């Protein structure tokens, strides 16, 4: 049973690689049978999951609260958009890397004033940045295309892919499946890197910075460098996620990344489970199916979707979910132990190490 | 008088107090002694209502205290000077004292004057922020703040902590005088058993949450076993 | 003199002050809530907006302006009190992130609710004082009776709040309850009542800010208070969360900065004005420009 257990606890790079690859493969299989609309949702969910993962690292592992990650998404998205406008033949990977780099840079810039601040001051500063995105995007027209935003060419489905799925759903719309698969794979790669980060020395150092910065300093950890790096990583992830999101819908406008998105990200992260991989996945899934969920709630309660109430139902539900989760299940869905997980727990009592979710 | 009966307190799985019973008679000083972690602070915190016991009861004269909110226990005349003194650093000396008088019906200016007379150092520093006070001054302030409301019961948690021996001796004298003059019931938690037993009338010794001895202070002090195992100090 | 008053410079000063006053009130409400509970209410702007909307619907029924103000403030205070008891009370003793997250969620839900109940269009109310600008020598001075009223109101409220905290028994209890709740309880202070009251007071002041905005601009859009909240927060942070005077000064400063940037540099950069000031201020003096106590409370 031991190697099984250590596999699930992902104690080596090897097992992490296998684990992520396995989950990615399963998800890819699912995309084959999903209808095109669901695949579109799934793709966007994957992009959002990447952002949530970065946010989880920042808030859950380094203990710094940020309400501004929608701004980093915007940076990544606009980077991709501006580049794609002039260089239409760049492979997707390079565009995303570019978005990641610019995202990370933005993170570094914002980290400079931010890492001196704690608690509400930090939250407020990041809130200010997030709130500034829409006006900046609207006003610096020459760079951002102003109100109209930037339109990009849709990602092209390779020929061999369409051939591969002849006869399944995909033959109806290979494009949406291609996008979904692409997003899932990119998400998988991102998750793999983050899993490594969680289990690395940096991860342990980060937890120490979060819980006991005096001790961390004594052990030689440079506090501001650690905190800044957390911002950069989160921003880089948000940049990739944002770029992917924009590429999926082939456009980016000032309205794509409003302040409410930051709130949504926070909600999804908290709901899923802060500081965990599975939490980010759950958050992404919830995001994918939230239009569906909202529609269900509307029909259940008999609310007309086009009425005022119906149109704002998503905001109401998400706000309520966030509040209820924080009050009753602060560590999110991922912390609810299913029977399977209970089975896999070791019987020997182990010293309880603080895990990522001790922040909340 | 404070009467504690069968008091048991748990912090999660840890039994902090086990079935503790003793009496602190009116107008006398009862010392609560024992090593670190013996449960002394928990005992005081349970009496003043900050901690809820798992079992047992506490009586202030005939009034039951368990289940009563802390602020109401304070208003009944139980003044608790907590571990670390609880001086609010961001406020001035006078503001801290005003706070002490807030919940009682005492005339503020009279009360202030009385405390300034008793502790002249406080009077000199009345407008200063408490972050500038020394350890001894903070202890004075904490006691004044407790006394300004004219309480019936005074709970003191390690008042000598961090203080030089001379100041500790002074402090103990002050406590004894107060007890006699104001007819206060004092429960004095101390690790410094020697100083405490000098002024106490009665003593309770706690060890790992249980009361292993209780009775006349002189008897407890003279008991060799107690001295060796629980008090760690040879008492003259 | 009159040429001075009608100069571009003074236009900007007056414009900046008028806007800055609203920021000051929001900042003040945040200082109140920080001083009395050590929690920062991120939903402050949204709550104020909600209360004002309720007040504005009452106006439709034909009551006067001042009743609208009174109702808005009263609703705001009630909302503040209820929020404290239901949402914040369970979170004492938990990590400080929790109330922030809950309040952010509350923000989302209130804005969505407001839009749902009252539609997403703007509403406004008739002003009590004339908003027509004065004239001097035939040119406009960017001051109106309403603006003067706003400024006087803000200063009056600020003085009242500062006096409350510094000189009254209640103020002392409020501050102590936030600084050292356990010790305060040991002294017989009803800490939970103080916390509720702090929220009520803060929400009331915030509501006044929203009412002024509703009167002054072309109305109040549900998400309007977001920007104002952010600016108010920055003002409070710059002024130092401990100081009512700092809050007001910070608010006016931000209002002026935004106005001047808008006028002399470019409208594009104006939203960034507040952020720039915040960053600069915090790098110079992390504890805010007006705080007495050294070091920022973590």
Image: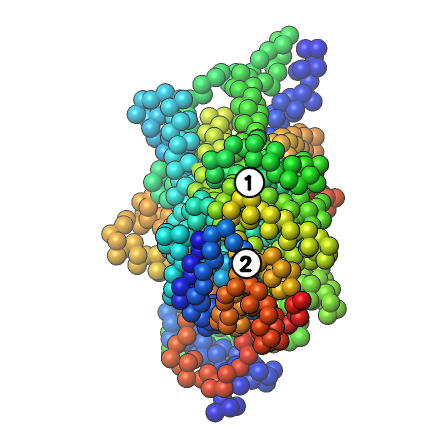
In the picture provided, is C244 more to the left or to the right than A179?
Answer: right
Secondary structure state at the residue bearing disc 2 = loop
Comparing labels 1 and 2, the label whose residue is closer to the camera: 2
Answer with mark 1 or mark 2, whichever residue precedes in sequence.
1
Marks 1 and 2 sit apart, C-alpha to C-alpha, by 24 Å
Q: Which mark is residue C79?
A: none
Name the chain letter of the residue that bears numbered label 1: B
Q: Residue furthest top?
A: C137
Give the residue displayed 53% in from the left and 44% down from the top. Answer: B182
Give the residue displayed 68% in from the left and 51% down from the top. Answer: B170
Give the residue displayed 45% in from the left and 18% down from the top. Answer: C128
Please say if B129 is above or below C137.
below
Q: Position of residue C98 (x, y in %)?
A: 50, 56
Which residue corresponds to mark 1? B148
Name the chain letter of the residue that bears numbered label 2: B
In the picture provided, is C248 more to the left or to the right than A301?
Answer: right
Q: Position of residue A289 (x, y in %)?
A: 39, 63
Task: Depth check: give the residue in front, B164 or A269.
Answer: B164
Q: Position of residue B48 (x, y in %)?
A: 47, 54
Task: Depth check: give the residue in front, B226 or A272.
Answer: B226
Please say if A318 is above or below C154.
below
How many residues crowd mark 1 within 10 Å: few (<14), some (14–19), many (20+)?
A: many
Give the residue displayed 59% in from the left and 68% down from the top. Answer: B221
Q: Position of residue B7 (x, y in %)?
A: 42, 65
Please say if B106 is above or below A65.
above
Secondary structure state at the residue bearing disc 1 = loop
Please say if C175 is above or below A177.
above
Which residue corresponds to mark 2? B201
Task: Depth check: give the residue in front, B182 or C7.
Answer: B182
How many residues crowd mark 2 within 10 Å: few (<14), some (14–19), many (20+)?
A: many
Asked if one can make out residue A31 in the rendered structure from this viewpoint, the answer is: yes
Based on the displayed image, in which of its 4 quarters is residue A308 positioned?
top left
């Amino acid at each position: 049973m031991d190697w099984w257990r250590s596999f699930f606890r992902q104690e080596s790079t090897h097992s992490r690689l296998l684990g992520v690859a396995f989950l990615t493969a399963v998800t890819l299989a699912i995309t084959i049978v999903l209808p095109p609309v669901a695949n579109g949702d799934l793709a966007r969910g994957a992009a959002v999951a990447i952002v949530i993962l970065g946010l989880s690292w920042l808030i859950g592992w380094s203990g710094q609260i940020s309400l501004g990650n929608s701004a980093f998404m915007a940076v990544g998205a606009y980077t991709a958009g501006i580049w794609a406008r002039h260089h239409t033949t760049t492979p997707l990977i390079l565009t995303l890397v570019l978005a990641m780099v610019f995202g990370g840079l933005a993170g570094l810039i914002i980290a400079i004033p931010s890492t001196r601040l704690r608690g509400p001051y930090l939250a407020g500063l990041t809130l200010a940045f997030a709130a500034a995105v829409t006006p900046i995007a609207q006003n610096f027209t020459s760079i951002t295309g102003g109100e109209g935003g930037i339109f990009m060419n849709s990602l092209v489905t390779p020929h061999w892919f369409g051939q591969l799925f002849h006869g399944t759903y995909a033959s109806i719309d290979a494009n949406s499946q291609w996008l979904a698969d692409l997003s899932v794979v990119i998400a998988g790669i991102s998750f793999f890197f983050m899993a490594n980060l969680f289990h690395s020395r940096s991860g342990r150092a980060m937890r120490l910075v979060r819980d006991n910065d005096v001790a961390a300093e004594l052990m030689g950890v440079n506090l501001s460098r650690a905190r800044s790096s957390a911002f950069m990583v989160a921003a880089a992830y948000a940049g990739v996620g944002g770029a992917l999101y924009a590429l999926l819908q082939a456009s980016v406008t000032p309205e794509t990344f409003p302040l409410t998105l930051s709130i949504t990200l926070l909600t999804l992260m908290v709901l899923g489970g802060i500081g965990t991989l599975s939490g980010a996945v759950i958050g992404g899934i919830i995001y994918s199916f939230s239009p569906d969920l909202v529609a269900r709630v509307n029909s259940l309660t008999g609310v007309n979707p086009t009425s005022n109430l119906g149109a704002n139902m998503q905001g109401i539900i998400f706000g309520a979910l966030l509040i209820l989760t924080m009050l009753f299940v602060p560590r999110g869905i991922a912390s609810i132990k299913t029977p399977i997980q209970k089975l896999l727990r070791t019987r020997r009592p182990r010293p309880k190490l603080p895990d990522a979710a001790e922040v909340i | 008088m404070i009467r504690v009966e069968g008091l048991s307190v748990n912090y999660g799985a840890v039994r902090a107090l086990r079935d503790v019973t003793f009496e602190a008679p009116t107008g006398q000083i009862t010392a609560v002694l024992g090593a670190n972690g013996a449960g002394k602070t928990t005992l005081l915190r349970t009496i003043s209502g900050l901690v809820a016991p798992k079992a047992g009861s506490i009586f202030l004269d005939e009034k039951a205290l368990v289940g009563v909110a802390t602020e109401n226990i304070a208003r009944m005349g139980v003044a608790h000077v907590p571990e670390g003194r609880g001086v609010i650093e961001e406020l001035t000396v006078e503001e801290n004292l005003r706070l002490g008088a807030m919940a009682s019906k005492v005339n503020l200016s009279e009360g202030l004057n009385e405390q300034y007379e008793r502790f002249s150092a406080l009077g000199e520093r009345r407008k200063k922020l408490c972050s500038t006070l020394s350890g001894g001054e903070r202890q004075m302030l904490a006691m004044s703040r407790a006394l300004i409301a004219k309480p019936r019961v005074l709970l003191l948690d390690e008042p000598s902590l961090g203080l030089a021996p001379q100041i500790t001796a002074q402090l103990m004298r002050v406590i004894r005088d107060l007890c006699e003059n104001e007819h206060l019931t004092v429960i004095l938690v101390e690790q410094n058993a020697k100083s405490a037993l000098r002024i106490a009338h009665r003593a309770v010794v706690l060890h790992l949450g249980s009361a292993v001895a209780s009775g006349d202070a002189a008897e407890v002090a003279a008991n060799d076993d107690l001295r060796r195992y629980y008090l760690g100090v040879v008492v003259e | 003199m009159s040429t001075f008053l009608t100069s571009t410079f003074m236009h900007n000063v007056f414009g900046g002050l008028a806007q800055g006053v609203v920021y000051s009130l929001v900042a003040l409400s945040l200082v109140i809530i920080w001083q009395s509970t050590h929690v920062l209410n991120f939903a402050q702007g949204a709550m104020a907006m909600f209360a004002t909307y309720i007040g504005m619907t009452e106006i439709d029924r034909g009551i006067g302006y001042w009743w609208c103000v009174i109702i808005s403030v009263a609703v705001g205070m009630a909302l503040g009190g209820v929020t404290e008891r239901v949402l914040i009370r369970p979170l004492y003793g938990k990590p400080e992130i929790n109330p922030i997250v809950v309040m952010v969620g509350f923000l989302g839900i209130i804005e969505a609710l407001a839009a749902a109940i009252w539609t997403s269009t703007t509403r406004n109310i008739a002003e009590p004082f004339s908003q027509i600008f004065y004239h001097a020598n035939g040119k406009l001075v960017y001051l109106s009776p309403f603006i003067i009223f706003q400024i006087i109101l803000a200063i009056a409220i600020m003085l009242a709040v500062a006096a409350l905290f510094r000189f009254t028994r209640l103020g002392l209890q409020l501050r102590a309850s936030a600084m050292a709740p356990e010790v305060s309880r040991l002294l017989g202070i009803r800490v939970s009542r103080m916390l509720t009251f702090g929220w009520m007071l803060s929400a009331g002041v915030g509501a006044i800010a929203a009412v002024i905005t509703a009167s002054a601009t072309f109305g109040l859009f549900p998400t309007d208070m977001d920007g104002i909240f952010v600016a108010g927060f920055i003002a409070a942070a710059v002024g130092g969360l401990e100081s009512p005077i700092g809050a007001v000064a910070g608010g006016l400063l931000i209002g002026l900065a935004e106005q001047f940037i808008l006028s002399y540099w470019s409208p594009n950069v104006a939203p960034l004005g507040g952020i720039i000031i915040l960053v600069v201020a915090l790098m110079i003096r992390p504890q805010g420009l007006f705080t007495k106590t050294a070091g920022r409370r973590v």
